[in-house]
Image (cartoon, rainbow, N blue to C red):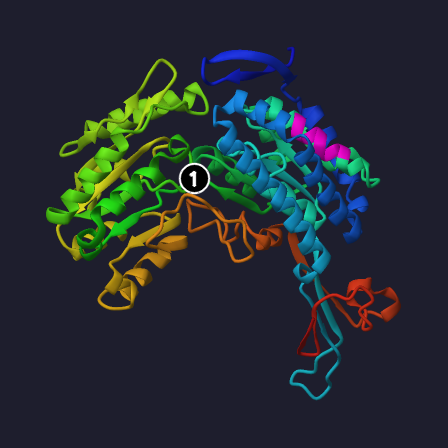
Amino acid sequence: MAAAPVWSVDPRTGKQREQVAVEATAQEVDAAVRAAQAAREALADRAVRAAFLRSAAAGLDAARDALVETADAETALGQVRLSGELARTVYQLRAFADIVDEGAFLDVVIDHPDATATPPVPDLRRYKVPLGVVAVYSASNFPFAFSVAGGDTASALAAGCPVVVKSHPDHPALSERVAEVLRRAAAGHGIPEGVVGLVHGFQAGIELIKHPLVAAAGFTGSIRGGRALFDAAAARPVPIPFHGELGSLNPVLVTEAAAAERAEEIGDGLAGSMTLGVGQFCVKPGLVLVPSGGAGDQLVKSLADAVAGTDAGVLLDHRMRDNFIAGVAERAELSDVDAPVTPGEGGEHTVSAGFLTVPAAKLTEEGEHDLLLEECFGPVTVVARYADEQEAKAVLSRLPGNLTATVQLSSQEAAGQGRGPELLAELTPLAGRVLVNGWPTGVAVAPAQHHGGPYPATTSTSTSVGGTAIERWLRPVVYQNAPEALLPAELKDDNPLGLPRRFNGRLER
């Protein structure tokens, strides 16, 4: 049977644009993984891989116009949004190069022997080493930042791990062009081009997770797809770490005092956040708890006015469009659910933004309304109107894990008066990032960032954004009583590489 062609498709029209490649066979996946495995040694030198990451960033920068044009043709996300996302991707690569240079990620700890300790301490020297080949599964909604050159790839390469990327079918042409930029950058530093492999096709993704030389995987996508790969990773003869971002409702709680103080501002802010990027952000607020009556009504009116003025938009592909239209229709048919602004079909290829309202009491116990507690990808949110604090708390107690949780407080509550501290404590178990008086869309790439959360937001406790994302692709190893002549340079007493470390209990920088 001939391999299926891979087409670039224009989501604005649904028409095929060009044949980009063919779906990879099991043999081609095997070849890509083995080529990546063969490139491991070339990544061993930290200076070389830092230079490689910087060259990759420069190459993407140089090809900016052509890459953004290709990305827009395949995603309809717009040149402004895509230019910003590419800039973020370039920054990530350079930031990880700085992390590699600094060396703190190696977590070097050296303890000399101490015969007086109970029990006695031998000579122990600990640091972290790369896991091996990493499988990266590209995301649909971030064709740069969570795809071929995105955070998973950048952090894996920084750790010293080659990657094989399974492209997303929504942007195959862009995937090929970005991979070519990375391979050219690798070749410029004597690194085999196989250090960044690229395969297309659903079956190729399955073959990739099963390959015995793949040591870990990173995924961003749906709960269904991510869970299937997660289970496959665990079912291997030798299970591997699977760092998946699967789905998130990103709840928002608006207190009665906050609504009374700034209802219009909160309504406008919510509208902007839930419709940003046509609602295709993984941190879109999908459930908002708003007090019933009074200022809560004013907030809902403000939200309705703002959302009604939002233009229809194009989703990433027609399958997502169909799922969105069907999903909001199913939710709108539930009892006691209203649609102040009806979400759904826009034009032939577009969708219109909207939101649903429901009494929060419908969400406090298991039933058909549980559908409203599931993510609906696209420009829609659910506003649950609560009667009192206990009802809001009951809804929060039923939520699964999330990437973010947000609380909108009054100025007095934000100053520590009233229930502000208590509400923050209630939200903390729900998410990896807890926001106060802000909106979750927009994930800063910074050392302190955490983009992850309890399942099903992610399948591990790690982050996929920020410097500590590198930790996913490393494992610690300790040498005991190893002669100095046999030790790697990172663990020698005289610290020839000038690494930050903990030496006999004292932190050295």
For label 1, the SS is: loop
Dominant secondary-structure state across the stretch colored magenta: helix
Q: Identify the magenta region.
A: 177-184
Can residue 66 be seen at all in this image of the molecule? yes
**Taking 500 as reference, is 380 left or right?**
left
Q: Position of residue 345 (x, y in %)?
A: 30, 19
Residue under the image location 71 percent in, 41 percent down: 162
- List the residue tagged with mark 1: 282
Q: Position of residue 46 (x, y in %)?
A: 77, 53
Quarter in which the N terminus is drawn: top right
Residue under the image location 48 percent in, 23 percent down: 76
Q: Nearer the viewer, residue 276 or 505?
A: 276
Can residue 131 be seen at all in this image of the molecule? no
Placement of 90 over or under 438, stated as above or below: above
In which image quadrant can residue 60 be found? top right
**Mark 1 Cα-neighbour bin, 10 Å: few <14, some 14–19, many ≥20:** many
Q: Is residue 64 magenta?
A: no
Q: Nearer the viewer, residue 216 or 503?
A: 503
Placement of 199 over or under 269, stated as above or below: above
Residue type of the residue flagged with mark 1: Cys
Q: Position of residue 44 (x, y in %)?
A: 79, 50
Question: Of all residues shown, which one is farthest toward the bottom?
Answer: 116
Q: Position of residue 186 (x, y in %)?
A: 77, 38
In which image quadrant can residue 90 be found? top right
Residue under the image location 22 percent in, 45 percent down: 264
**Taking 186 as reference, is 469 left or right?**
left
In which image quadrant can residue 129 be found? bottom right
Q: Nearer the viewer, residue 56 or 133?
A: 56
